[in-house]
Amino acid sequence: MQSLRFWVVLLLLFVIVMGVTAWKDWWLTGERPNVLFYGVVPPLSIAGGTLAVLGVARAIRRPLGFLEILSLNLGANTVMQVAEIVLKIVYCRVWEYPGLLYLVVVLPLGLLLIVGFIH
């Protein structure tokens, strides 16, 4: 699979982005972020998504390994978290757009990232 350097960089980027997310939430709400939430929920979500995709890959007999799927999922989630940070700041500080715009941006971007990473 990928090198140790790849995993260190990917995990470091994820941790930095989650730290920025916690800071952004603190800045926008004025409430101290729950560190336990940021340390548990995103990793469990990524692990659950990775296991679900692995199950589907095995069911349809695709030769995808756990680490491949994990790297795709972690990369896509990191990019999507950056998009969420930007959209939330735009929403709260610049322009209160309708929630449907969020769906129009976030859902297609997530799908495009996963498809783009696969190809």
Image: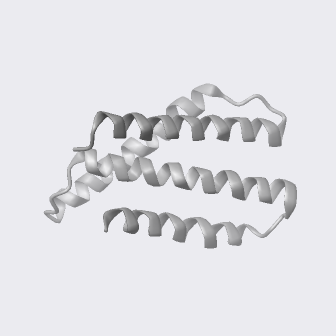
Identify the image quadrant of the N terminus. top left
Total marks placed: 0
Residue 95 sits in quarter: bottom right
* For residue 103, side relative to residue 11 (left or right): right
| Up-down relation of residue 11 to residue 68 (above or below) | above
Q: Coloured how?
A: one colour
Question: Relative to 56, is 6 above or below?
Answer: above
Q: Residue 96 or 16: which is nearer the viewer?
A: 16
Which picture quadrant has residue 38? Answer: top right
Residue at left 39%, top 67%? Answer: 116
Position in image of residue 4 (x %, y %): 30, 34
In the image, residue 10 lies at what x, y percent? 43, 41
Instruction: Give the quarter of the figure containing the C terminus.
Output: bottom left
Q: Specify whether 110 is left or right of 83.
A: left
Left or right of 98 on screen, residue 16: left
**Residue found 86% across the figure and 60% down from its top:** 94
Vertical relation: 42 (above or below) 110: above
Q: In terms of image quadrants, where is residue 117?
A: bottom left
Q: Residue visible at 78% across and 59% down?
A: 90
| Residue at the image point whose x is 76% and y is 28% from the top | 32
Is 73 left, or right, of 106 in this rendering?
left
Give the image location of residue 26, x and y in percent.
77, 35
